[in-house]
Amino acid sequence: MALKLLQITAPISAENNIRKMAASEGVLSFTRGTDVEDDHAMFFLLTSAENRQQTIDKLHSLVKTSTQARINILPVDATLPAPGGIQGQSDTREELYPKLVSSVHMDLTYLMLAAFSTIVALVGLIQDNIAVVIGAMVIAPFLGPNLAFAFGTSLGDRSLMRKAFLTGITGVSVAVLMSMFVGVIWGYIPDSAELMARTDVDLSGVALAAASGVAGVLSLTSGLSMTLVGVMVAVALLPPAATFGFMLGAGELRLAYGAMLLLSVNIVCVNLSGLVVFLAKGIKPRLWFERRMAKPYVLWAIAFWSAALIGLMWVMGTNPMVALYYVLNQLELTLLS
């Protein structure tokens, strides 16, 4: 449900200001709880998705003078009487941050998932078994780092951007090296349509990657399960990475080049579309000077990813304007569906 309960510990002296703010922001209900130590009290605000981010931002300003102040965001499964109107779903900046920070934690589990998903994907590609390839997508951990990098860029968070970049590039490198090792051992190119399909890139692949980035951000910000979207992003990243490494190991440089081009296009499209959707959803720093500091990162990122996409389109021999129209058309269909 889109409703969330804000549990606030704040100085008693801030009660009137919190009450006035709650009324001005259209908070569904305001309740004063019990007093706690050091002249503080508990306050409870029932919020909807439409006003939650603005409410939290204003609460930050109201309670920032107290070192003991705290804002907890609690889920609400149901409430009676039910609020009127249709409630949308949208997570706040504060709710998204811990999700994405945890997704860029590079540990043994992450590396093992990257390695095992690559092995499973290679088995499916070599055997021309699409069901096995899809199974590899379920365990591939490539969604989090890409969305975290776009999220960190929208906030100008250099630490998160750096961690997301290192985690993402490590995961892809593990996939490439693992598949390269298999390619060296295998020694020849099997008769597999699934494998050969990842050695060429066209506009449908570009649209798939762009739609994956959009769907990933929409699922993340809506508080929905990202399992299926993670599969969609893995479709764009894991098979090309595995194919690239396998072809390198087998000594097929021309086919490896095609797979590398497909992987590069997909990485650019996932990151560019993810960043654009974060910006469209209003994800930005809370304070004005933080927004000012983040602006160069956003502009440079959009310019870099756009230039990279145009360059890759040129290498592919595709008119960038035609490609852009095709991608935007596919994204529109994704958003409307």
Image (tube, helix red, strand yellow):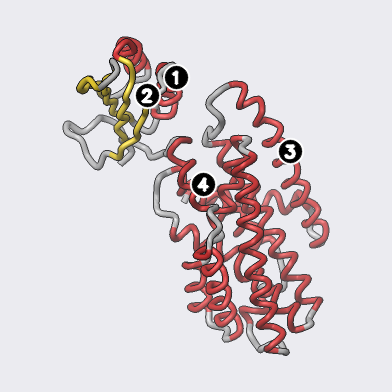
Closer to us: 95 or 29: 95
Residue type at mark 1?
Lys
Q: Are marks 4 and 3 in contact (CB under 8 Å)?
A: no
Label 2 Cα crowd, 10 Å radius (few <14 / some 14-19 / many 20+) = some
The residue at the point 70 percent across, 78 percent down is 180
Label 3 Cα crowd, 10 Å radius (few <14 / some 14-19 / many 20+) = few
**255 left or right, relative to 148:** right
As drawn, the label of residue 300 is: 3
Q: Quadrant of residue 297?
A: top right
**318 left or right, relative to 7:** right
Q: Which residue is mark 4?
A: 101
Residue type at mark 3?
Trp
Q: Which comes before the other along the chain, label 2 or label 1?
A: 1
Q: Which residue is mark 2?
A: 69
Considering only vertical position in the picture, is 318 above or below 194?
A: above
Closer to us: 305 or 12: 12
Closer to us: 58 or 52: 58
Q: Give percent across and percent down for residue 115.
A: 57, 72
Q: Give percent across and percent down for residue 28.
A: 28, 25
Closer to us: 13 or 103: 13
Regarding mark 3 in the picture, which secondary structure is present there?
Answer: helix
As drawn, the label of residue 64 is: 1
Q: Give percent across and percent down for residue 287.
A: 55, 23
Residue type at mark 2?
Ala
How far, Cα to Cα, is label 4 from label 2?
23 Å
Q: Are marks 2 and 1 in contact (CB under 8 Å)?
A: yes
How far, Cα to Cα, is label 2 from label 1?
7 Å
Q: Which comes before the other along the chain, label 4 or label 3?
A: 4
